[in-house]
Image (spheres, helix red, strand yellow):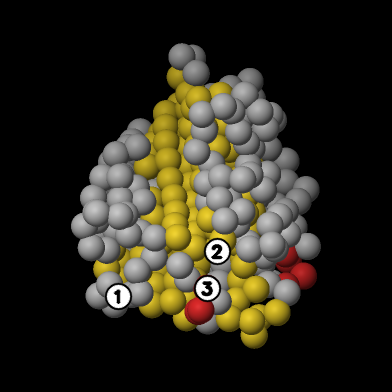
Amino acid sequence: MPHACGFPDTTNTGVPAGMRLRRVPSQVSHGPGWYFDPAGAVRVVGNGAVLQGLYIPYNVSVTASRVTIRDDRIVVSGNRFGVSLHHTHRVTIENTDIYSPYAGRNRLMVGIKDIYGNSTGLSILRDDIWHTATGVQVESGLVAGCYIHAMGYRPGDHVNGITSNGGNTALLVIRGNTVFNHRIQTDAISLFEDFGVQANRIISGNLLAGGGYTIYGGQKPGGPAEYNIRITGNLFSRVYYPRGGFHGQVAYFSRTGRKDRWTGNGWSGNATEKLAGLIP
C-alpha cells in the first residue's frame, strides 16, 4: 500500500474514519453561505462558507471565495462534476471523498474542475478521488496529498489524473500525491497547451503509474514555448505497465525551455534508478 512508503492512499485521505455525516438534503438543506437547489446541486454563494461533515449526492457549485469544503463525501455520476469552481479565490477542498459508484458509462466526468480556469489560491488537499474520467482539472494553486485512482471510463473519454489545459501562467504545484491510472490512456498528470502556453508548474514528490504516458510535460508540438516546468523527485511505478505508462514515463517535456528541470525522478521499486536518460 502506498501509505507504507509515505504516500497517500485510502488510509490517509478522504473523510476521517468513523466520522458521521449528515445527508443533504434530507438531514440538512442549507447553512451559512450555501443551500440545496432542488434542480440538483448544492450552491455555495457566500464568501467564507464552510461545508463540513456532509454526505452530498449532488454537484457542489462554488461561486464564492474563501470557501472550505472539508470532511465531506460527494457522490455524483455521469457527465457532471463533483466540485465545480466559478471565478473563485482561496477555496480549500480537503479530506473529502469525491467519486461515482460506477466505473463505466456512469462514471463521474471530473472530480474537481475549475470551470473557467481562472480561480486563484486553490488548495486541494488529502482528497480521495475515484471512478472519474478526470480527477482534478485546474490551472493554478496547490494539489497535495491526494489519492486519485480507479479511473472511470466511458467511450470517448480522455482519462486524466490531474490535468491543466494551459493559458494561465499562475503557479500550479502538484506535490506528494498518489495518482494511479490503470487505463491505457491518457495520463496520471498532464500539462496540455489547449488554451495557451504552459508555464510555472511544479510536479514534485508524487507516486505515479499508468496512462498512455504517465506525464505529459507541457510542450505541444508547434505550440508556444513552455517555461519553468519543474518535474523533480517523483517515483514511477510499474504496477500496470513495464515503462510506467503504456508508452513510457513522459512525453512532450522540453529540457531546453527557460528554467525547465527534470531531476531526481526514479522507479518506485528502486529510488536510485533515475530516469534522466529516458526522456524522449
Residue drawn at (52%, 73%) of the image: 278
Image quadrant in which the C terminus is located? bottom left
Circle 1 sits on which residue? 256
Q: Residue at x 68, y 37 (%)?
A: 21
Q: CA distance from mark 2 to mark 3?
A: 8 Å
**Counting residues from the N terminus, which is met first, the one under dot 3 or under dot 1?**
1
The image shows residue 141 at horizontal and vertical percentages of: 37, 58
Front-most of residues 152 and 24: 152
**Disc nearer the start of the sequence (2/1):** 2
Quick one: label 1, few (<14), some, or many (20+) residues within 10 Å?
few
Front-most of 98 and 202?
Answer: 202
Residue 229, percent from left and from top:
35, 69
Given the image, on which type of amino acid does mark 1 rest? Thr
Give left or right: position of 100 versus 121.
Answer: right
Residue 146: image quadrant is bottom right
Report, in whole angstroms, how far the alpha carbon at label 2 lies from the one at label 1: 18 Å
Q: Which residue is labeled 3 in the image? A: 278
Measured Cα–Cα span from mark 3 to mark 1: 15 Å
Q: Is residue 177 above or below residue 112?
A: below
Local SS, label 2:
strand
Residue 274 occupies which quadrant of the picture? bottom right
Give the residue at mark 2: 249
Query: Disc 3 marks which amino acid?
Result: Leu
Residue 71 in view: no
